[in-house]
């Protein structure tokens, strides 16, 4: 597979993500320059995001090319191009959290993606009937953050049954994309 220039990879990922997100319309959370969200420059180092009780969680991108540097398009938007075979991640900062828009460009891409989550003491992930995970303050029993259930669709806007599983401290997003029209876009989304 030929190597892409980082900016070319970022452009391809943005074009694929924009195509799908534009069709989804007003339901999409808006990008926002939020000082409470801190991105690292490398994929494996991930992002620190706030919780409602003023703590911070850490979400990593566990990918084949973990040392991949971000192409920062603006403070609230960066692209980790080539994080795995035929896969890019468009990382957005939101007013109340983050999105890790995963763009799968072809059939050789993995069908699952791991997002290790580090929580401060006293917080835990709790599975929700919706398929998402709540970040719960164990002392008070209150939800202080939420990983919304994932969605995915292909370039023909056909839904793909993305789902989460918990593997130790990692949220695993499964995207069964066999037979899909590429690119496929999926959306891990965390907010407080």
Image (tube, helix red, strand yellow):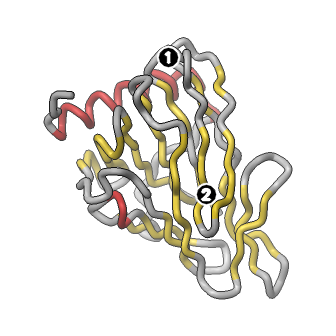
Residue 151, quarter of the rendered image: top right
Q: Position of residue 82 (x, y in %)?
A: 29, 41
99, above or below 123, in the image: above
- Percent position (x, y) of residue 81? 29, 42
Question: Residue 52: image x %, image y %?
Answer: 66, 73
Which residue is painted at 60% across and 52% down in the image? 172
Instruction: Locate the C terminus and report the quarter of the image it occupies.
Output: bottom right
Q: Is residue 71 left or right of residue 156?
A: left
The residue that appears at 67% across and 48% down in the rendered structure is 164
Work out whether 182 lies above or below 18. Answer: above
**Is 43 on the left or on the right of 182, as rendered?**
left
Question: Looking at the picture, how far across and down is residue 123, in whole percent?
Answer: 69, 79
- Could you say whether the residue bearing mark 1 is in a helix, strand or loop? loop
Which of disc 2 and disc 1 is earlier in sequence? Answer: 1
Looking at the rendered image, the disc whose residue lies closer to the viewer, 1 or 2, is 2
Determine which residue is flagged by label 2: 171
Crowd around label 2: few <14 · some 14–19 · many ≥20 (10 Å): many
Q: Which residue is mark 1?
A: 155
Dot 2: what SS?
strand
Per the rendering, the mark at residue 56 is none
Residue at (42%, 33%) from the top-left corner?
109
Q: Is residue 79 visible?
A: no
Q: Are marks 1 and 2 in contact (CB under 8 Å)?
A: no
Residue at 32% from the left image edge and 48% from the top image edge: 78
152 above or below 70?
A: above
Q: Is residue 159 above or below residue 62?
A: above
Query: Which residue is nearer to you in this view: 98 or 163?
Result: 163
């Amino acid at each position: 597979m030929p190597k892409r220039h980082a900016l070319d990879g970022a452009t391809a990922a943005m074009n694929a993500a924009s195509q799908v997100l534009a069709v989804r319309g007003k339901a999409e959370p808006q990008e926002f320059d939020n000082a409470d969200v801190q991105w690292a420059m490398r994929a494996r180092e991930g992002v620190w995001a706030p919780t409602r009780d003023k703590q911070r969680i850490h979400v990593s991108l566990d990918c084949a090319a973990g040392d991949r540097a971000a192409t920062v398009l603006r403070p609230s938007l960066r692209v980790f191009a080539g994080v795995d075979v035929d896969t890019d991640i468009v990382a957005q900062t939101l007013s109340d959290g983050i999105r890790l828009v995963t763009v799968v460009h072809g059939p050789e891409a993995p069908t699952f993606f791991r997002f290790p989550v580090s929580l401060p003491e006293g917080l835990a992930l709790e599975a929700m009937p919706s398929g998402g995970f709540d970040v719960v303050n164990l002392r008070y029993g209150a939800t202080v953050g939420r990983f919304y259930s994932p969605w995915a669709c292909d370039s023909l806007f056909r839904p793909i049954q993305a789902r989460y599983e918990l593997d130790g401290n990692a949220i695993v997003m499964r995207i069964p994309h066999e037979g899909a029209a590429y690119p496929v876009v999926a959306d891990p989304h965390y907010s407080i």
